[in-house]
Amino acid sequence: MPFNQKLQKFNAKINTVTIGSGDKTVTIGGDSTYPFYSFDAPSENAPKIGVEISDMGLENIVSEGIKAYYDGASTIGEMAKKAAAMEGGDFVVLNLEGGDPNGVNKSTEELIAVVKEVAEAIDCPLVVEGCKNVEKDAELLPKVAEALQGRNVIVMSEKEENYEAIGAAAGLAYDQIVGAESAVDINLAKQLNVVTTQLGVNAQKIVMNIGSAAAGYGYEYVVSTMDRIKGAALSQNDNMLQMPIITPVSAETWGVKEATASEKDMPEWGPEEERGIDMEVMTAAADLAAGSDAVILRHPEAVAAISRMIKALA
């Protein structure tokens, strides 16, 4: 008996969100099937890759390959240009980790100067991540949204504790895209989207960071959460879960022992550079297969590998 394939295309679809302005924009979302199910229906927009740089430059970078890629870049603006030119990348991500009050504690004014320098150096879409301190981000990110008015950037790091400040500034006052961040829980992700839209933010101007982990580090929770979110968005037409998902991968993978333990300490594991790249690639590939519409990476080899995967499967 011949096999008759039954297509699984849903009437609902993931929202489309366009990042950037002018001629240099990228669009994520828009699909009405599960990730890479091109045999059910063509993908409206293939997943995208962001290349992450930090206001701290290369100070906290352990990878020699990443350092070599940015060799000769003496300013954050020059780093941004190299990030924008990385093969396979679609947009630049600026991480403002230096603003953390428990770390370097750069002032808001210092960080805004960095944001402006990066924005002036590139013409591709830009995403800005906060410092992971909810109070500092509530002060910093509204000013980032103001400084980048007209660029249609994603302002990440909106959380339950600071959504009123960040959502109102980024999503309403300055017409940016809001990156709603929750902690690997479908109910928390949905609730943050609900309260953000109740502020008046257009649901079409919200993306979700539902949380992440490096592969092997409780990663099954990430996969199951993404799977449940995509299932509810498509099969149940839940419009509070139809926002595209963007996942910061590099911050998780380059901090685990598989990426940081030296070859001298763990000779049986092989070269640490290769291990770091492998962790970044494996985690990003799993994120995309589970439902992420964009991933944020650092290493040029990881970016190239994931770009090849997307082209082969999307």
Image (spheres, rainbow, N blue to C red):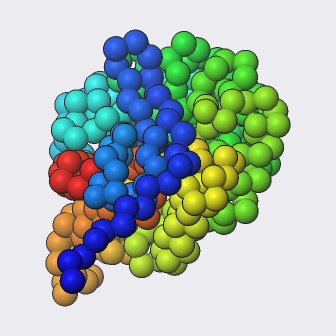
Between residue 34 and residue 21, name the one nearer to us.
34
Q: Is 272 located above or below residue 242 in the figure?
A: below
Residue 82 x, y percent position in the rendering: 25, 30
Left or right: 217 in relation to 65:
right
Q: Is residue 8 left or right of residue 111?
A: left
Residue 184 location in percent, x, y? 61, 65
- Most extreme residue toward the bottom is 268
Q: Residue at x 31, y 35 (%)?
A: 90
Q: Quadrant of the N terminus?
A: bottom left
Q: Quadrant of residue 15?
A: top right
* Residue at left offset 19%, top offset 66%: 274
Residue drawn 36% across and 39% down?
A: 45
Residue 262, compared with residue 121, is above or below; it is below
Picture coordinates of residue 147 (x, y %)?
59, 16
Work out whether residue 66 can be spotted: yes
Q: Quadrant of residue 110?
A: top right
Position of 286 relative to 115 (above/below): below
Q: Which residue is painted at 52% across and 26% down in the image? A: 153
Most distant residue in the front direction:
1
Judge left or right: residue 10 versus residue 50.
Answer: right
Can you see residue 113? no
- Residue nearest the observer in this picture, 254 or 10: 10
Numbered label tally: 0
Q: Where does the image place residue 141, in percent across and percent down from the top left? A: 65, 31
